[in-house]
Image: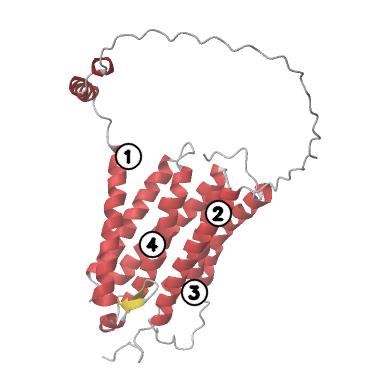
Amino acid sequence: MASECSPSGGPQMNTDISGIGVRVSFYLQTLFLSCLCARSGSPDEIVGALYTLLFTNTAMAVTALILGFQRNPEITFHDGLIIFYLLNLSWVTVVYVSLPVVAKFPNVKLLHVVSVVQSYIIFAFAFTMLISAHSFGRAPECNSHAVVVLFHPFPALPAGRILCLVLTAFFFTVYTGILVKDHLPPTPKRILQWIQQKVNKEVPAADQELPTTQPEAPPQPRPAPPRLAARRVEYHARKPPAVPEYDLQIEWPLVIEILVVLILWGLTVMNTELLISLNHFAPSDGQSSWQFGQVLPMFLVVLPLANLITAFRDHGLRKNPTSQRT
């Protein structure tokens, strides 16, 4: 059986799951949702766009699991790395940018449940792909040629695999720990009372620590010196003219937050596109890059884009007095 690897290293890309349209859709959804969370105070605008991204992430992870582990896999390890990068970008946007804002809104319990399901499906895909990296997907003979990029390319096997496994395990542990902590029942009242009694016994009262001292006699007032008669002189200074103050109506913390989002988002997109460029995928037999599987995901960008335009049209960069954000 002839190898599918190109002379420079990579197999053909499955454009239906990691093509240009899918990537642009992920990039823009995460960017628009991050900016929307920074600007908008409307729960309807944020929650609607967040549901779209959650279902997109879940569908992508489930599809990658099915296509990568069926009897005749339809994606390669190189495709899996692209999906891994895209899902990481999207997952961080959901968990660390959007959910802290949405948590302040009422009636978002279902959203949190969907978010937890999405997170563990993404973790399942990441762990299974990385653990079986040597034999994952179609054309496993090409897997040893893959590279990963973190501002600099290095081999995916074994160094990149180990790094990705460590990072995935770290985020899995932190995320699970936060979930467990948030859902643990409160400490029983008796245990709290027992702890308080132990602390009170070991720490002496403040009045017992202070040494007893004899009160000192108040000092005698000194006689006031004789007053000298003096003529009161008044000076009238001219006040400087008032300088008018101009309010630019710009919420500078919002501007800084958006700039930080743009910088981090740009760095992540740069690493993902470098990953694709440096893996040297084989040509796709003259097929167009923009097929049905690439055009359809672009429509998922419409809702967050419309909400973002509405939010900035209503509020601009001004402080939103009706915002529910703290």
Q: Residue at (62%, 38%) from the top-left corner?
A: 321
Q: Is residue 140 above or below residue 84?
A: below
Mark-to-mark CA distance, 1 and 2: 30 Å
Badge number at residue 88: 4
Disc 4 residue type (three-letter): Asn
Residue 85, how many percent across, how many down?
Answer: 39, 67
Q: Which residue is mark 3?
A: 20
Mark-to-mark CA distance, 3 and 1: 39 Å
Q: Which residue is mark 1?
A: 182
Q: Residue at (25%, 76%) from the top-left corner?
A: 157
Q: Is residue 246 above or below residue 30?
A: above
**Disc nearer the start of the sequence (2/3):** 3
Q: Residue at (40%, 51%) from the top-left corner?
A: 95
**Disc nearer the start of the sequence (4/2):** 4
**Disc nearer the start of the sequence (3/1):** 3
Residue 228, how many percent across, how many down?
Answer: 68, 14
How many C-alpha atoms fall within 10 Å of the one at disc 3: few (<14), some, or many (≥20)? some
Kindly tell me whether residue 118 is visible in this rendering: yes
